[in-house]
Amino acid sequence: MGLSGRLLQMIIASGVIIFAMVAAVATTNAKPAGCPRKCGDVEIPFPFGLKETDQACYLNKVFDIFCDSGKPMIGNLPVINISIETHELHVLNTVVRDCYDWSGQRVSKNTKKLSAAQFTISNTKNQFTVLGCDTQAYLGGFQNGERYWLGCSSLCPSLNNVVSDSCSGVGCCELGFPDGLKDIWVQVQSFSNHTNVSDFNPCGYAFVVEKGKFNFSTDILRNLPYNRVPMVFDWAIGNETCKEAQKKPNFACEDKNSECFEPQNREGYQCMCKQGYKGNPYLYGGCEDINECEDPTLNNCSKMCNNTEGNYTCYCPKGYHGDGRKDGEDCSADPTAVIAIKIPIVIGVSFVVILGVSSWLFIFHKKRKLIRLKESFFRQNGGLILEQQFSKQQRSKEMAKIFTVEELKKATNNYDESRIIGQGGFGTVYKGFLLDKRIVAIKKSKTVDQNQIDQFVNEVVLLSQINHRNVVKLLGCCLETQVPLLVYEFVPKGTLFKYIHHESSASTITWETRLRIAAETAYALSYLHSAASTPIIHRDVKSSNILLDDDFTAKVSDFGTSRLVPRDQKELATVVQGTLGYLDPEYLQTNQLTEKSDVYSFGVVLVELLTGGDVLSFNRSEKERSLAMYFLSSLKEDRLFEVLENCIVEEGNEEQIKEVVELAKRCLRVKGDERPTMKEVAMELEGIRKTETHSWVSVQSNLEEAEHLLGETSHAYEQGGSSSRTVGYDSMNDQVTLALGDGR
């Protein structure tokens, strides 16, 4: 055989090999035609598939669905819908119950773990809900590989104060949670085994539920009639980026008309059909062309439309010329048809004129409506009353100002997300720049009680007059929005909490600085209790509500839960509100709020400054779960050196530390009458700052009574994982807070 013959054979052999490779690829990409795609009434689209079928029917084991008697299940959760377009998995989530009989014995399991492969819980579609009159619950999970906790409490001594369709903490409590949360578990428990409310509320409930799918009513507190609620997962493919996945043979975006996207705040990638196509991008040939000409809203043609692959074209009918597009060269009549189209032109021009006039009238009406709406909000939020109060006072540059909504929009760049410096359950705080170059913090709350507008106005007037170097200054407010906006001075270094608990920051504040911060905070609280024109009980003293300026000067902030106390009253009966771990146990049991409640909370802050420990920690034994109990137990057992922050022990100052330890112990006394006043605390701290240091003397005392009451309080927290400092949300910071009742 000649050279030409051998060359021909090689060409034929190469062609056969190429054909075989193409066929192999086509076979690999094509999914088996016999795969069942339905379980009961639920469609099971690829990449999901039924577990009992061939493995080629689903992408991998993450996406296998078990069909149990016509009910699709993923793990232990029934599936009710799977969406390819939104990449959502709708399931029925379990309601976790914590029930007790008349004697206070638990009769149901109170913890439930939910693990669904790599799927994340949708934070935009779900919320964490807790029901009960003697109930607290925790939601735990992993976010970006780290443990995450939040909690919520629901209390009510009777059904008299419970309002249907309202989840404000009385009978019902609800919270949002961050994006990217997976492998969650829910734990619900009781403060006193429901013995006080068992006749109308024997159980506590907790669950993650799809927003808008649960309506609260008082009848539910007696008995929740169902065991499951709808919930939404977000799903994606693997944990690789699009660029990484495209290099591998098992890349899931099979169709040539599909595109790869990377979801925000979670791992993996998602496939979508390109513009002009619809269908399943995870199947070979799954993205089908959309006929835009069938739907006028999908095309831009003025006259005639012709569908093409993935697109469409416009053209003009006979007797007209142009490209036929509404935004291009619309169809115009040929010269021979000019006369025939004059009438439509006149009609068109008239229509445009009418449309222009109508648009102008509409815009004018809309502006007038907006002005009236702002005036309505201004009156509704007590603006007229506030103006009258301000007019009675001698105005000065330091006094509060009523800002316009336009001023604050401009200061925050229309509330740009990049300006957010704090966010929680009660609202969001933005960093703003006023026209006079001042930097401010603008608090945008979520709700306001219209029945307490007069009290809100009085508090704004009062707080605007407080001019103490250790209290965050209220600069003014805006009343032209549905919920009033408050404007505070901006404190640059953030919270004391950050500098105590973050390892990278804790060593930057010396013992001298810590002692000064404690003294300044004490002076601020003493001023609020006794020197203000109307005494103020802060009610939420904690390290995350103490801000630090550039010189580490302390400034007490966040008066969202504070109460004004008439001078002829020693205490107020209120719904308990504050932060777990800082709450005065006497206030928690009696609902009687006094200035000594702030003293107890300040004592916990002193212990934080001394130890750097978490206020609540599940890493400690149940008896010592709260920092206050842990501290007092350490004193009794002569283990103080074990709990003190290493960096302050190494500095020496033994005598000063000893005196602060003794002062903290007195602030944490069980009975409020036995605690010092904030004025006494402030004076004692100032005296300690002036003392000389001496050798260390062991600190021991009789702490049985304090241990007993704090021990009772600690039973409210059962072991569930790592540290949990707070529960619920704080209005000024990223800190989680407990709202056991309505706020102000």
Image (cartoon, helix red, strand yellow):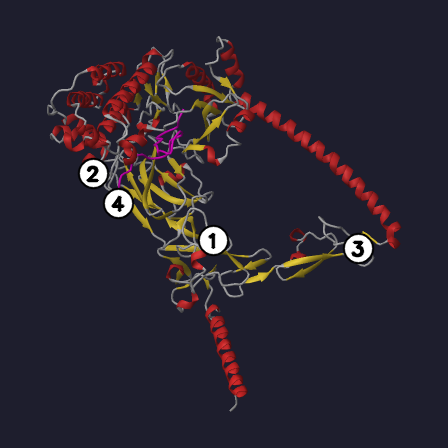
Task: State the separation of the CA atoms marked 3 and 2.
Answer: 83 Å
Q: Which residue lies under the disc numbered 3?
A: 321
Q: Residue 82 in the image: state x and y as whole percent.
A: 46, 56
What amino acid is labelled 3 in the image? His
Q: Which disc number belongs to residue 107?
A: 4
Residue furthest toward the front? 3
Residue 206 located left or right of residue 617: right
Q: For mark 2, give the secondary structure.
A: loop
The answer, for residue 33, to whether it is visible in the render is: no
Upstream in the sequence, badge 1 or badge 2?
1
Q: Residue 616 in the image: state x and y as whole percent.
A: 26, 34
What amino acid is labelled 4 in the image? Val
Task: State the separation of the CA atoms marked 1 and 2.
Answer: 41 Å
Task: State the separation of the CA atoms marked 3 and 4.
Answer: 81 Å
In reply to whether residue 737 is colored magenta, the answer given is yes
Q: Magenta residues?
A: 720-744
SS majority, magenta: loop
**30 vs 531: above or below:** below
Residue 645 located left or right of residue 207: left
Q: Which residue lies under the disc numbered 1?
A: 87
